[in-house]
Amino acid sequence: MCISFPGRIIAFKEDDCLAVIEIGGTKREVSLDLLDEAVSLDDYLLCHAGFAIHKIDTEEAQKSLALLQEIIDNEIY
């Protein structure tokens, strides 16, 4: 089992092979090598271990981020 987190693309690097994503105020670089579709600034990606693994729509990303914030706020872990 793996855990992935939704991150919003805020920039591209190295000939668009890497994206800078933002998750809850934290910025990370992720590889786009595993994606099979084009992505743009402000798209949301599910990311795991430094790789973007799937593009998701904004509504689904917001739901996931809200759930993660609820878990953090209520210390449900």
Image: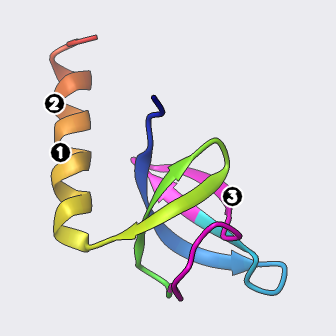
- Pick the residue in front: 36 or 77: 36
Name the residue beneath numbered marker 1: 66
Q: Amino acid at mark 1?
A: Ala
Q: Residue at x 15, y 16 (%)?
A: 74
| Residue 40 part of the magenta segment | no
Q: How dense is the environment of label 2, judged by Cα within 10 Å: few (below 14), some, or many (20 and up)?
A: few
Q: CA distance from mark 1 to mark 2?
A: 6 Å
Q: How dense is the environment of label 1, judged by Cα within 10 Å: few (below 14), some, or many (20 and up)?
A: few
Provide the secondary structure element on which disc 3 rests. Answer: strand
Query: What segment carries the magenta color?
Result: 21-39
On-image quarter of the N terminus: top left
Pointer 3 or 1: first along the chain: 3
Q: Is residue 9 above or below residue 76?
A: below
Q: Amino acid at mark 2?
A: Glu
Q: Residue at x 45, y 64 (%)?
A: 54
Q: Residue 47 appears at what percent x and percent y? A: 52, 52
Q: Residue at x 24, y 72 (%)?
A: 58
Name the residue beneath numbered marker 3: 29
Q: Is residue 73 above or below residue 63?
A: above
On-image quarter of the C terminus: top left
